[in-house]
Structures are given as structure tokens and as C-alpha cells.
Image (cartoon, grey):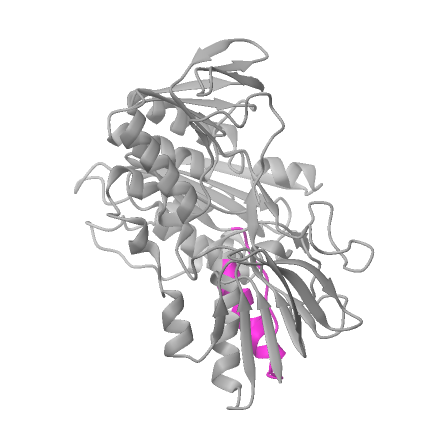
């Protein structure tokens, strides 16, 4: 049996290892990676800028040689797949090292190609000093540019997860940081009143915020010198553009493969595509959202690893279904932890839920022990009080609450159920009523 996997990162190699455990000596596992690196933690890359993570090498979980030598996987680098022929069960592409074409037949295929940053067609986008951050080479280019050009002002286009993490780490090395955001707030997945806490933190940390402005072009003589929006001009020495991601599925024929509007591959609970013997997993595929009860597209490393494992099990005949996502995430932004799960109020409204919200400001631990303010918001159905989502922002304790809330959402619990939970209490960790339960009491 020949198993072919396109993509050598989280979902691809989770699947490869799962297949390896179930395969025989006669089976062949071939992985095709367009870049040079396998299995690395992309979420750690912004912290290499400040030195909190010493090197991009430190985020590599397993070098490609380990897969080849220890696990016997035919792990290839610099192999870009450009087409899949489901009728012949062949993948074809180009070996970028020698510019030679290749064709490989498969018995089972997994597409795990991930996503890439959106590159807008703004004038000047290719000037020196303009970067995005998604891969190890991206990060190394930014660091080399910082060291060689010593920019004083860094402008970040996009106030999402990566943009905010880059902002924090750029400030840590003494750069003047500006964030330009097309919407009215940072972190669009959370509601405005929670995002306002991030705005206050950014200003306290010396980050310049520009809202409701749309970048039109970059200007400069070979190197970027200015960002021009629809409302103003901003001098800059370096720019980092992270305004979203797009699934790496351009090599698939949309008349053959079922894709959603964003280009993500439609899969069922067993990670099967609409094509026989072809599975897909990770950021290039859709996620079933348990709260929305519909397919979603929230590319996260946690989901990619789970989907890859499940795809690998199904590929070798061990039936296992993917149970879906809740939409849980967390971000460190200077002194704040920012976490969310399920639906925001904005999402609940747009999806037509008959919802209510409760927001509180409380203390993450016993008030007499320490002052650790925590802002908490719950979204729930009006009549049933079934939980729909929540957000937490504070200097400590947001991670604990959001994980409890994510577990509750997974099990379709209500705010009343939250009150019945037996949660840990000790003054350094909590009050006698956990903040989640304080909020839940207000829904009775």
C-alpha cells in the first residue's frame, strides 16, 4: 500500500505517524513538503523576535531526518504538488531543488497543505522591508532585516493574533510599533467592550493604534518608507502584513473537489473528501463547529493535530470521527491574557440566536489575597440558558476559565450547570465562587 501525504507540518505528520503505527514493512509512506521544514510550532515564531524563544530552530518538533531515519518515512522537501488526478490516483508537481517534474501514484492520499498569508495587491507590496509571518523562512527574513537595517518604526497591518504577538515582541526590543486595523477594534473574534481592554493595554505599552483605515499602498525607493491609507500617510522603516490566511488549495480543480467559499476542502467527520481514497485535514480543510452546528474555518494548530490523527486512523481502516470544534483560543498581549470560546455576541446575533449576555468585572483569586482583575462575558440562550460562548480578559486566570467554559460548551451545558460544578478553591487560585459561577448567578 502506498500512502501519499501532501504537507509536512501538524496534520500531515500526525497522520503519517498514525499510519506508520498501523502499517506493515511492505507499505510505503511518502510525504511531500514544499518547504524545507517539517513539524514546527508556527505559534512560537513571534517570540523569536524578542529572544523569548532563542531561535527558529527551537520551534522544530522533529527535524525531517528523524522521520526518515527513525520512522522510515520517505519525507521529501522542496516538492511542490501542482495537481491531483483522482482518476489515475496520481499527484504531480515540481521538485524545486532541480526544477524537475515528478509524478507519484497513490493508493490513499491525504491533503494537509495548510494555509498561507493573504497577500493584498497594494502598490509597493514587494518593496524591501515588507514582510509577513507564517513560516520559519518568513521569521528569519524579518530578523535579518531587523539586524541589518535596524528599523526604528515598525508598522503592522492587521490586529489579529499574529499581529498582536508581533507588536508585543517588537516593543520588547525597543521598536516604535504602529498597528493599522481596517475595523474598529483589535481581535475581531471578541466583542468590542472586551477588545477595548486590549486597546488600553496597547496604549499603556506605547503601541500606536490606527482604526477604521484601509491601506492603499506603500511608498519608498526600493525600501518601504511610508504606508498610505485612505485617510493618512504614516512613515515607517519596516512593515509586516498579516491580514488573514487562505487555504493552500489552488492546485485542486474546484470542478472536481468540493471546496467552500474560502477555498477550504469540505470533509465529513471521517476527514473524507468527496473523492474516493482522498482525505484532507488541518488548516486547508473545514472544521465542524459544534455550537454553530455547521462547517466553519478556524485554522488552529490544536485542530490540525487532531484532524491529522483522525485522518490517519481512518486511512488505515480504524474508524474514528472528528467531534468538531468549539472555537477556543487564547493570546498573551503584554500583561493581559485574552481568551475566547464558542460564539461572541456579534456571532450569536448574526446567526439569529435568541441570546442574552452577562458581563462582570471580578477578581481571579480571593480578593483579600491579591488583586487580579478579571473581565468575563458569557453568551447564552435566553429560555434554556444553554451556553453559547464566552470571553475572558485579565492578568491571570483567563486560561482556566476559558477551558472550563470550553468543556461546558462541548457538553451542551447551561449557566445553571455551571453553578453545579465542583471547582477548585484556595485563596491563591480562586474565590469561593469562581468567576464563571459569579457570572452564571446573574443569569438566574
Q: Can residue 64 be spotted in the picture? A: yes
Residue situated furthest bottom in the rendering: 25
Q: Is residue 338 left or right of residue 174?
A: right
Q: Is residue 160 left or right of residue 82?
A: left
Residue situated furthest top in the rendering: 232
Residue situated furthest left in the rendering: 369
Residue 318: image quadrant is bottom right
Location of residue 244 with respect to 434 vertically, above or below: above
Q: Nearer the viewer, residue 315 or 199?
A: 315
Q: Nearer the viewer, residue 312 or 133?
A: 133
The image shows residue 389 at horizontal and vertical percentages of 53, 47
**What span is colored magenta in the figure?**
303-327
**Is residue 319 magenta-colored?**
yes
Q: Nearer the viewer, residue 314 or 173?
A: 173
Location of residue 57 with respect to 104 vertically, above or below: above
Name the residue located 77 percent from the left edge and 55 percent from the top edge.
253
The image shows residue 435 at horizontal and vertical percentages of 36, 45
**Is residue 39 magenta-colored?**
no
Name the residue located 83 percent from the left edge and 55 percent from the top edge.
255
Quadrant for the N terminus, please: bottom right
The image shows residue 60 at horizontal and vertical percentages of 35, 58
Location of residue 385 with respect to 236 vertically, above or below: below
Q: Nearer the viewer, residue 263 or 80?
A: 80
Residue situated furthest right in the rendering: 255
Q: Is residue 427 left or right of residue 127?
A: left
Amino acid at each position: 500500500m502506498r500512502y501519499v501525504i501532501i504537507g509536512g507540518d501538524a496534520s500531515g505528520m500526525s497522520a503519517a505517524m498514525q499510519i506508520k503505527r498501523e502499517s506493515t514493512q511492505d507499505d510505503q509512506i511518502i510525504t511531500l513538503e514544499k518547504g524545507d521544514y517539517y513539524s514546527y510550532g508556527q505559534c512560537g515564531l513571534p517570540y523569536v523576535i524578542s529572544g523569548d524563544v532563542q531561535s527558529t530552530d527551537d520551534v522544530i518538533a522533529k527535524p525531517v531526518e528523524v522521520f526518515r531515519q527513525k520512522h522510515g518515512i520517505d519525507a521529501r522537501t522542496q516538492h511542490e504538488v501542482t495537481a491531483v488526478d483522482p482518476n489515475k490516483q496520481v499527484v504531480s508537481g515540481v521538485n524545486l531543488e532541480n526544477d524537475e517534474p515528478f509524478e507519484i501514484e497513490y493508493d490513499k492520499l491525504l491533503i494537509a497543505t495548510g494555509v498561507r498569508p493573504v497577500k493584498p495587491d497594494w502598490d509597493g507590496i514587494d518593496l524591501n522591508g515588507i514582510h509577513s509571518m507564517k513560516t520559519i523562512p518568513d521569521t528569519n527574513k524579518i530578523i535579518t532585516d531587523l539586524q541589518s537595517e535596524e528599523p526604528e518604526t515598525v508598522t503592522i497591518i492587521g490586529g489579529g493574533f499574529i499581529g498582536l504577538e508581533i507588536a508585543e515582541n517588537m516593543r520588547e526590543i525597543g521598536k516604535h510599533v504602529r498597528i493599522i486595523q481596517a475595523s474598529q477594534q483589535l481581535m475581531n473574534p471578541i466583542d468590542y467592550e472586551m477588545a477595548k481592554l486590549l486597546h488600553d493595554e496597547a496604549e499603556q505599552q506605547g503601541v500606536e493604534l490606527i482604526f477604521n483605515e484601509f491601506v492603499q499602498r506603500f511608498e519608498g525607493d526600493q525600501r518601504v518608507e511610508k504606508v498610505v491609507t485612505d485617510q493618512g500617510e504614516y512613515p515607517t522603516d519596516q512593515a509586516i502584513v498579516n491580514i488573514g490566511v487562505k487555504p493552500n488549495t489552488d492546485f485542486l480543480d474546484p470542478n472536481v473537489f468540493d471546496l467552500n467559499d474560502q477555498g477550504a476542502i469540505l470533509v465529513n467527520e471521517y476527514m473524507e473528501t468527496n473523492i474516493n481514497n482522498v482525505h484532507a485535514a488541518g488548516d486547508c480543510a473545514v472544521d465542524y463547529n459544534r455550537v454553530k452546528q455547521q462547517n466553519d474555518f478556524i485554522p488552529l494548530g490544536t485542530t490540525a493535530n487532531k484532524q491529522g490523527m483522525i485522518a490517519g486512523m481512518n486511512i488505515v481502516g480504524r474508524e474514528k470521527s472528528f467531534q468538531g470544534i468549539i472555537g477556543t483560543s487564547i493570546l498573551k498581549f503584554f500583561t493581559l491574557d485574552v481568551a475566547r470560546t464558542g460564539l461572541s455576541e456579534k456571532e450569536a446575533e448574526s446567526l439569529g440566536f435568541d441570546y442574552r449576555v452577562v458581563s462582570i468585572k471580578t477578581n481571579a483569586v480571593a480578593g483579600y489575597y491579591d488583586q487580579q482583575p478579571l473581565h468575563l462575558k458569557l453568551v447564552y440562550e435566553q429560555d434554556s440558558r444553554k451556553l453559547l460562548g464566552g470571553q475572558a480578559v485579565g492578568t491571570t486566570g483567563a486560561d482556566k476559565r476559558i477551558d472550563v467554559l470550553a468543556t461546558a460548551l462541548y457538553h451542551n451545558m447551561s449557566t445553571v450547570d455551571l453553578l453545579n460544578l465542583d471547582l477548585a478553591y484556595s485563596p491563591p487560585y480562586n474565590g469561593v465562587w469562581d468567576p464563571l459561577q459569579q457570572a452564571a448567578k446573574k443569569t438566574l
